[in-house]
Amino acid sequence: MLRVEKLSAYYGATQILHDIDMFVESGEIVGLVGANAAGKSTLMYSLSGLRTRCTGSISIDGRRIDALQADQRVPLGLVLVPERRRLFPFMTVLENLEIGAYSADARAHRRETLEQVFTLLPRLAERRDQEAGSLSGGEQQMVALGRALMARPRILLLDEPTEGLAPIFVNLVYDLVRALRALEQTVLIVEQNVQHVLRTADRAYVLENGRITMHGTGEELLGNERLKVAYLGL
Ligand SMILES: Nc1ncnc2c1ncn2[C@@H]1O[C@H](COP(=O)(O)OP(=O)(O)OP(=O)(O)O)[C@@H](O)[C@H]1O
Ligand SMILES: [Mg+2]
Protein backbone atom coordinates (compact mmCIF):
# COMPACT_ATOMS: atom_id res chain seq x y z
CA MET A 1 0.00 0.00 0.00
CA LEU A 2 2.73 2.47 1.06
CA ARG A 3 6.05 2.37 -0.75
CA VAL A 4 9.05 4.56 -0.02
CA GLU A 5 12.03 4.54 -2.36
CA LYS A 6 15.36 6.29 -1.90
CA LEU A 7 13.82 8.85 0.41
CA SER A 8 16.23 11.46 1.74
CA ALA A 9 15.19 14.33 3.97
CA TYR A 10 16.85 17.59 4.91
CA TYR A 11 16.48 20.40 7.40
CA GLY A 12 18.18 23.27 5.59
CA ALA A 13 21.48 21.92 4.32
CA THR A 14 21.63 19.12 6.89
CA GLN A 15 20.71 15.70 5.57
CA ILE A 16 18.82 13.65 8.19
CA LEU A 17 17.50 10.67 6.21
CA HIS A 18 19.56 8.77 3.66
CA ASP A 19 18.02 6.66 0.88
CA ILE A 20 15.24 5.08 2.91
CA ASP A 21 13.54 2.11 1.22
CA MET A 22 10.52 0.63 2.96
CA PHE A 23 7.01 -0.59 2.34
CA VAL A 24 3.85 -1.28 4.30
CA GLU A 25 1.26 -3.73 2.98
CA SER A 26 -2.46 -3.29 3.49
CA GLY A 27 -3.55 -4.52 6.93
CA GLU A 28 -0.01 -4.78 8.28
CA ILE A 29 1.26 -3.43 11.59
CA VAL A 30 4.80 -2.25 10.89
CA GLY A 31 7.22 -0.96 13.53
CA LEU A 32 10.01 1.59 13.14
CA VAL A 33 12.53 1.54 15.95
CA GLY A 34 15.72 3.46 16.62
CA ALA A 35 17.59 5.51 19.17
CA ASN A 36 16.98 9.18 20.00
CA ALA A 37 17.75 11.46 17.05
CA ALA A 38 17.92 8.55 14.57
CA GLY A 39 15.41 10.38 12.38
CA LYS A 40 12.20 8.51 13.22
CA SER A 41 10.03 11.61 13.59
CA THR A 42 11.67 13.13 10.52
CA LEU A 43 10.56 10.07 8.56
CA MET A 44 7.00 10.41 9.86
CA TYR A 45 6.97 14.12 8.94
CA SER A 46 8.37 13.32 5.49
CA LEU A 47 5.59 10.80 4.87
CA SER A 48 3.01 13.35 6.07
CA GLY A 49 4.45 16.16 3.98
CA LEU A 50 5.38 18.33 6.96
CA ARG A 51 8.47 20.39 7.74
CA THR A 52 11.19 18.61 5.78
CA ARG A 53 12.54 18.92 2.26
CA CYS A 54 12.69 15.49 0.64
CA THR A 55 13.97 13.70 -2.41
CA GLY A 56 13.02 10.21 -3.55
CA SER A 57 9.55 8.78 -3.95
CA ILE A 58 6.59 8.04 -1.70
CA SER A 59 3.57 6.30 -3.19
CA ILE A 60 0.25 5.00 -2.00
CA ASP A 61 -1.28 2.21 -4.10
CA GLY A 62 1.15 3.04 -6.87
CA ARG A 63 0.30 6.75 -6.91
CA ARG A 64 3.16 9.17 -6.23
CA ILE A 65 2.27 11.54 -3.39
CA ASP A 66 5.65 13.10 -2.59
CA ALA A 67 4.85 16.29 -4.49
CA LEU A 68 1.59 16.81 -2.56
CA GLN A 69 1.15 19.18 0.38
CA ALA A 70 0.33 17.72 3.80
CA ASP A 71 -3.36 18.69 3.61
CA GLN A 72 -3.65 16.90 0.26
CA ARG A 73 -2.23 13.69 1.74
CA VAL A 74 -4.80 13.37 4.55
CA PRO A 75 -7.76 12.70 2.22
CA LEU A 76 -5.64 9.98 0.57
CA GLY A 77 -5.52 8.32 3.96
CA LEU A 78 -2.15 9.23 5.52
CA VAL A 79 -2.92 10.40 9.06
CA LEU A 80 -0.22 11.17 11.65
CA VAL A 81 -0.50 11.18 15.43
CA PRO A 82 2.59 13.27 16.22
CA GLU A 83 4.81 13.06 19.28
CA ARG A 84 3.18 14.87 22.20
CA ARG A 85 -0.47 15.03 21.60
CA ARG A 86 -1.56 18.55 20.68
CA LEU A 87 -5.19 18.39 21.77
CA PHE A 88 -7.39 21.43 22.18
CA PRO A 89 -7.38 21.56 26.00
CA PHE A 90 -10.45 23.73 26.49
CA MET A 91 -12.59 21.69 24.15
CA THR A 92 -14.36 18.53 25.23
CA VAL A 93 -13.28 15.02 24.33
CA LEU A 94 -16.15 14.80 21.85
CA GLU A 95 -15.23 18.12 20.21
CA ASN A 96 -11.60 17.04 19.89
CA LEU A 97 -12.70 13.79 18.26
CA GLU A 98 -15.00 15.55 15.83
CA ILE A 99 -12.17 17.80 14.65
CA GLY A 100 -10.50 14.64 13.32
CA ALA A 101 -13.29 14.10 10.82
CA TYR A 102 -12.48 16.97 8.49
CA SER A 103 -12.12 15.37 5.06
CA ALA A 104 -15.37 15.07 3.09
CA ASP A 105 -15.36 11.27 3.36
CA ALA A 106 -14.66 11.34 7.10
CA ARG A 107 -17.41 13.92 7.68
CA ALA A 108 -19.90 11.78 5.79
CA HIS A 109 -19.14 8.78 8.05
CA ARG A 110 -18.73 10.76 11.27
CA ARG A 111 -21.43 9.11 13.41
CA GLU A 112 -20.51 5.60 12.43
CA THR A 113 -16.78 6.20 13.00
CA LEU A 114 -17.48 7.83 16.37
CA GLU A 115 -19.38 4.71 17.49
CA GLN A 116 -16.43 2.59 16.42
CA VAL A 117 -13.95 4.83 18.29
CA PHE A 118 -16.07 4.64 21.46
CA THR A 119 -16.18 0.85 21.13
CA LEU A 120 -12.39 0.67 20.72
CA LEU A 121 -11.71 3.25 23.45
CA PRO A 122 -14.58 3.03 25.96
CA ARG A 123 -12.89 5.48 28.34
CA LEU A 124 -13.51 8.21 25.79
CA ALA A 125 -17.21 7.49 25.76
CA GLU A 126 -17.31 7.86 29.55
CA ARG A 127 -15.47 11.18 29.37
CA ARG A 128 -16.95 12.58 26.18
CA ASP A 129 -18.09 15.87 27.80
CA GLN A 130 -14.96 16.45 29.90
CA GLU A 131 -12.44 19.12 28.83
CA ALA A 132 -9.49 17.40 27.16
CA GLY A 133 -6.99 19.42 29.21
CA SER A 134 -8.35 17.95 32.43
CA LEU A 135 -7.65 14.33 31.38
CA SER A 136 -4.65 12.33 32.54
CA GLY A 137 -1.73 12.02 30.12
CA GLY A 138 -2.75 8.50 29.14
CA GLU A 139 -6.34 9.52 28.57
CA GLN A 140 -5.16 12.42 26.41
CA GLN A 141 -3.18 10.00 24.28
CA MET A 142 -6.37 7.97 23.84
CA VAL A 143 -8.10 11.12 22.57
CA ALA A 144 -5.25 11.79 20.12
CA LEU A 145 -5.54 8.22 18.82
CA GLY A 146 -9.32 8.47 18.60
CA ARG A 147 -9.10 11.80 16.78
CA ALA A 148 -6.78 10.25 14.17
CA LEU A 149 -9.17 7.33 13.70
CA MET A 150 -12.00 9.83 13.11
CA ALA A 151 -10.15 10.82 9.89
CA ARG A 152 -10.66 7.22 8.65
CA PRO A 153 -6.98 6.69 7.81
CA ARG A 154 -5.91 4.13 5.26
CA ILE A 155 -2.56 4.14 7.01
CA LEU A 156 -2.25 5.39 10.55
CA LEU A 157 1.17 6.83 11.47
CA LEU A 158 1.88 6.74 15.21
CA ASP A 159 4.96 8.56 16.53
CA GLU A 160 5.88 7.18 19.97
CA PRO A 161 2.30 6.72 21.18
CA THR A 162 3.43 5.31 24.54
CA GLU A 163 6.07 7.91 25.39
CA GLY A 164 5.77 9.04 29.00
CA LEU A 165 2.74 6.85 29.72
CA ALA A 166 2.20 4.69 32.79
CA PRO A 167 2.41 0.93 32.11
CA ILE A 168 -1.36 0.52 32.25
CA PHE A 169 -1.77 3.03 29.39
CA VAL A 170 1.10 1.47 27.43
CA ASN A 171 -0.89 -1.77 27.57
CA LEU A 172 -4.07 0.02 26.50
CA VAL A 173 -2.28 1.52 23.48
CA TYR A 174 -1.07 -1.95 22.45
CA ASP A 175 -4.54 -3.43 23.07
CA LEU A 176 -5.80 -0.79 20.63
CA VAL A 177 -3.10 -1.62 18.05
CA ARG A 178 -4.06 -5.30 18.23
CA ALA A 179 -7.75 -4.42 17.89
CA LEU A 180 -6.87 -2.31 14.83
CA ARG A 181 -5.02 -5.25 13.34
CA ALA A 182 -8.17 -7.36 13.70
CA LEU A 183 -10.02 -4.60 11.80
CA GLU A 184 -7.30 -4.72 9.10
CA GLN A 185 -6.32 -1.14 9.82
CA THR A 186 -2.82 -0.52 8.45
CA VAL A 187 -0.47 1.03 11.04
CA LEU A 188 3.13 2.30 10.98
CA ILE A 189 4.30 2.78 14.55
CA VAL A 190 7.47 4.49 15.80
CA GLU A 191 8.67 3.26 19.16
CA GLN A 192 11.55 3.34 21.57
CA ASN A 193 9.71 0.69 23.55
CA VAL A 194 11.37 -1.90 21.31
CA GLN A 195 10.25 -5.10 23.05
CA HIS A 196 6.62 -4.07 23.01
CA VAL A 197 6.49 -3.06 19.38
CA LEU A 198 8.45 -6.07 18.12
CA ARG A 199 6.08 -8.41 19.93
CA THR A 200 3.09 -6.73 18.31
CA ALA A 201 4.22 -5.74 14.80
CA ASP A 202 4.14 -8.03 11.79
CA ARG A 203 7.43 -6.54 10.58
CA ALA A 204 9.76 -3.79 11.68
CA TYR A 205 12.58 -1.58 10.44
CA VAL A 206 15.55 -0.36 12.46
CA LEU A 207 16.67 3.21 11.75
CA GLU A 208 20.20 4.23 12.75
CA ASN A 209 21.66 7.65 11.96
CA GLY A 210 19.08 8.23 9.24
CA ARG A 211 19.57 4.86 7.53
CA ILE A 212 17.59 1.63 7.63
CA THR A 213 20.10 -0.91 8.92
CA MET A 214 17.88 -3.92 9.61
CA HIS A 215 14.42 -5.13 8.87
CA GLY A 216 12.49 -8.32 9.38
CA THR A 217 9.57 -9.84 11.21
CA GLY A 218 9.14 -8.81 14.82
CA GLU A 219 10.21 -12.29 15.86
CA GLU A 220 13.37 -12.23 13.73
CA LEU A 221 14.41 -8.88 15.14
CA LEU A 222 13.68 -9.93 18.74
CA GLY A 223 16.17 -12.77 18.17
CA ASN A 224 18.76 -10.58 16.43
CA GLU A 225 21.98 -10.47 18.48
CA ARG A 226 23.07 -7.01 17.40
CA LEU A 227 19.64 -5.54 18.08
CA LYS A 228 19.56 -7.21 21.48
CA VAL A 229 22.82 -5.53 22.44
CA ALA A 230 21.99 -2.12 20.95
CA TYR A 231 18.36 -1.69 21.98
CA LEU A 232 17.13 -4.35 24.30
CA GLY A 233 19.91 -4.20 26.86
CA LEU A 234 20.09 -7.99 26.87
N1 LIG B 1 13.43 21.47 12.62
C1 LIG B 1 14.66 20.95 12.65
N2 LIG B 1 15.74 21.64 12.20
C2 LIG B 1 16.97 21.11 12.21
N3 LIG B 1 17.27 19.86 12.66
C3 LIG B 1 16.26 19.14 13.13
C4 LIG B 1 14.90 19.63 13.16
N4 LIG B 1 14.12 18.68 13.69
C5 LIG B 1 14.94 17.63 13.97
N5 LIG B 1 16.21 17.91 13.65
C6 LIG B 1 17.37 17.00 13.81
O1 LIG B 1 17.15 15.83 13.05
C7 LIG B 1 17.67 14.68 13.72
C8 LIG B 1 16.59 13.62 13.80
O2 LIG B 1 15.54 14.08 14.64
P1 LIG B 1 14.20 13.28 14.84
O3 LIG B 1 13.30 14.11 15.65
O4 LIG B 1 13.71 12.81 13.51
O5 LIG B 1 14.70 12.00 15.67
P2 LIG B 1 13.87 10.87 16.40
O6 LIG B 1 14.44 9.58 15.94
O7 LIG B 1 12.43 11.09 16.23
O8 LIG B 1 14.30 11.10 17.93
P3 LIG B 1 13.41 10.92 19.28
O9 LIG B 1 13.44 9.47 19.58
O10 LIG B 1 14.18 11.71 20.29
O11 LIG B 1 12.03 11.45 19.03
C9 LIG B 1 18.16 15.18 15.07
O12 LIG B 1 19.56 15.29 15.01
C10 LIG B 1 17.51 16.54 15.24
O13 LIG B 1 18.30 17.41 15.98
MG1 LIG C 1 10.93 11.47 17.49
Image (cartoon, rainbow, N blue to C red):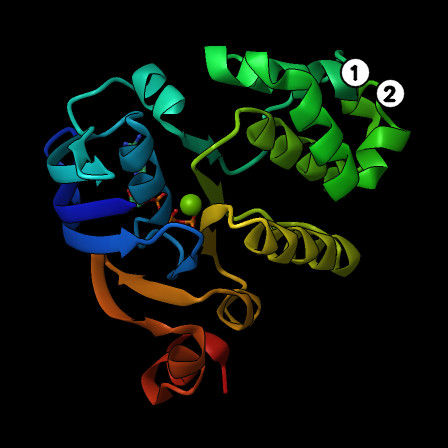
Badge 2 or badge 1: first in the primary sequence: 1
Instruction: Say if mark 2 contacts mark 1, CB within 8 Å.
Output: yes
Residue 88 visible somewhere in the drawing: no
- The residue under the point 38% across, 50% down is 26
* Amino acid identity at mark 1: Thr
Rendered-image quarter of ligand 1: top left
110 vs 124, left or right, is left
Residue 7 visible somewhere in the drawing: yes
**Whole-percent x, y for residue 83 in the image:** 51, 38
The quarter of the picture where residue 84 lies is top right
Q: Residues within 10 Å of mark 2 (few under 14, many from 20)?
A: some
**Whole-percent x, y for residue 206 in the image:** 32, 65
Assign the N terminus to one quadrant of the image. Answer: top left
- The residue under the point 84% across, 38% down is 123
Looking at the rendered structure, which numbered label has been put on residue 73?
Answer: none
- The residue under the point 70% across, 31% down is 143
Total marks placed: 2
Residue 89 versus residue 178 in the image, above or below? above
Q: Nearer the viewer, residue 182 or 127?
A: 182
- The residue under the point 10% across, 33% down is 13
Q: Residues within 10 Å of mark 1 (few under 14, many from 20)?
A: some
Q: CA distance from mark 2 to mark 1?
A: 5 Å
In the rendered image, which residue does mark 1 sit on?
Answer: 92
93 vs 22, left or right, is right
* Amino acid identity at mark 2: Gln
45 vs 165, left or right, is left
Tell me the SS state at disc 1. loop
In the rendered image, which residue does mark 2 sit on?
Answer: 130
Ligand 2 closer than 8 Å to the CB at disc 1? no
Q: Residue furthest right?
A: 126
Tell me the SS state at disc 2. loop
Residue 76 versus residue 40 in the image, above or below? above
